[in-house]
Amino acid sequence: MTDLSVRRTAEPADPPDLIEPSADGLGWKDFITSMKSTAVGANVVLAALSTGLAVWADGVGRWLLASLVGVSVLLFLGQLGVAGVRLRHRARLQLAEAHYRQELGAAREEVARATERAAAAATELAGLQVLRGRHAAVLAALQDMWLSYPAPYTDDIELTYLIGTTAEGDRVVERRHTCPDPGAALPFMQGRLTTPTQLDAEAVALADTEIVARSEDDKIAVRTIALTEKPGLLRCMFVFVPSIAGGPADWFARYRMPGLWDTLRTTGHDRLTWTPTQRVADPTGSTVSRLTVNFDFPPEAGDDVFVRDADNRELKRLSGPDGSLRYQWSCADPRPELYTWELWWARRGPARG
């Protein structure tokens, strides 16, 4: 048998379009490549020379020779110009391709970094969700503990509602005279802040109320912890450090509640409800020994406002500490039931929210 030998052809070199452009511009080899395409022009020159030599003696031949040589030279120079233009175009394409590759590489690196950041954010979010679940469990435990707390104290409460001409002027001040039972200590107390109750009302966060709570003599620090933050319901825990013990303590909580009286300013009528906290040991009685409610209108309200209680009796009309118009209601030993007050304000001109 005849041995068959298999010969592999050499792998083709990189196509000319993928060759990186020289930093020094166009080289001699590039021109040689372009000049190969000018063989036709060279053949024309040789043919012209042969013809000229054949009729050298004739004057017509000399002119013909000169014309052919001139045409050949022009063709040759044109070929060189075209070659130069093509080479510059190819160089621009190669530079654009190199720039595109650099941008593609940078984009891939950015995608990788973004993927890493997204993974880190997902891990952090999972950790925050776990902490949020633990926080909710602690708040639920505090709520259950307070509901079962015997509440060994009584409260004199004065609620003052500052009704502004605009939503930003709505504020609430709660003053309390808290008396623990003999031998008892009060480390904390749950409270429900007054919030808007309209159907479209949004949830109010405790931090947004800018609440300030402190004792009148600054001997007891009062800290606030949000328990429930839902539309129409803002419940918090007041923690006393040290605990209220050995005698009564006077303290207050002051907070903003923008939009609390928007309905009153818009329609001219609104309603406020409030329920005293009932005792755990005696559900028929409340922890409040006396409840006072003040409605402070701006001085310009004049005679355009009035307030009535659930029995349709107009509240006592007084002058507030800053010259405002105050309506006051007071009750000793209120029962743990719903109390209601109706407010009217016949504002002149367009209402402002």
Image: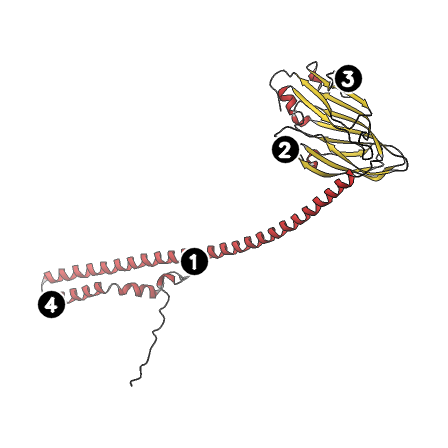
What is the C-alpha distance between the residues marked 1 and 2?
56 Å
Q: Image quadrant for the N terminus?
A: bottom left
The mark lying in front, picked from 1 and 2, is 2
Compared to 134, does 334 lie above or below? above
What is the C-alpha distance between the residues marked 2 and 4?
108 Å
Judge left or right: residue 38 versus residue 181.
Answer: left
Disc 3 residue crowd, few under 14, some 14–19, many 20+, Cα 10 Å: some
What is the C-alpha distance between the residues marked 3 and 2?
33 Å
Residue 245 falls in which quadrant of the image? Answer: top right
- The mark that comes first in sequence, 1 or 4, is 4
Q: Is residue 320 visible?
A: no
- The mark that comes first in sequence, 3 or 2, is 2
Q: Which residue is mark 1?
A: 98
Q: Amino acid at mark 4?
A: Ala
Q: Secondary structure at mark 3?
A: strand
What is the C-alpha distance between the residues marked 1 and 3?
84 Å
Q: Which label number is shown at residue 54? A: 4
Labels 1 & 3 near each other (Cβ < 8 A): no
For image coordinates 75% across by 41% down, the residue present is: 144
Q: Which label number is shown at residue 318? A: 3
Q: Secondary structure at mark 1?
A: helix
- The mark that comes first in sequence, 1 or 3, is 1
Labels 4 & 3 near each other (Cβ < 8 A): no
Residue 40 falls in which quadrant of the image? Answer: bottom left
The structure's colour scheme is: secondary structure
